[in-house]
Amino acid sequence: MARSSVTCVMWNYPTMADGTKVPFRPSERPRISPWMRAHILERHQAAPEDRPEWPTKSKFPAEWNADRIIEAVDLTLADPGRPPARYGDKIRFERVVDGHVVRVQVRVDMEPPEIWNAYPVEREG
């Protein structure tokens, strides 16, 4: 998979509320696999009229194309706007991108850590 064009501005992530550290640096963050890219887009990209929606899934803005969605996911991992938080075997990263909160979950019980999901949470403001 090609390297991201997103530049990391942090050397390390901040320590999480439980006192633990994220087990990778922003520059070493997990990359989106082809399977995960398809998973995110299938479930969370606003569907064209000829494709059925996943009715219970949150949607990225309709004006965001697939590349913009994946870029927002990578940006969220590269430079989260909120401190990361641990939830069981996952670490949650969040960032506001164009007024929308993007959440990325990374499984850290795997080697190497792997993106588990990414989706929009809410509109900021």
Image (cartoon, helix red, strand yellow):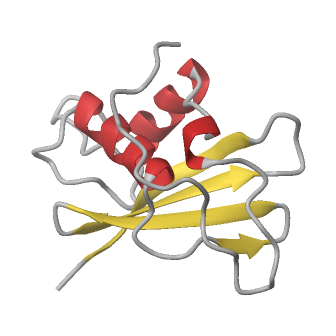
Q: At which x and y percent is residue 86? A: 74, 72
Residue at the farthest top position: 1
Q: In this picture, is 90 found above or below 6?
A: below
Residue at 55 percent of width and 30 percent of height: 32
Query: On the rendered structure, is 61 left or right of 88?
Result: left
Q: In this picture, is 24 found above or below 123?
A: above
- Name which quarter of the figure residue 102 lies in: bottom left
Residue at the farthest front position: 11
Of 49 and 31, nearer the camera is 31
Q: At which x and y percent is residue 80? A: 45, 63
Of 93 and 46, nearer the camera is 93
Residue at 80 percent of width and 85 percent of height: 18
Residue at the farthest left position: 63
Q: At which x and y percent is residue 99? A: 18, 69
Residue at 72 percent of width and 39 percent of height: 114
- Name which quarter of the figure residue 51 lies in: top left
Q: At which x and y percent is residue 123? A: 23, 75
Query: On the rendered structure, is 72 left or right of 47?
Result: right
Count up the numbered dots.
0
Q: Quadrant of the C terminus?
A: bottom left
Q: In this picture, is 11 found above or below 17?
A: above
Residue at 31 percent of width and 56 percent of height: 59
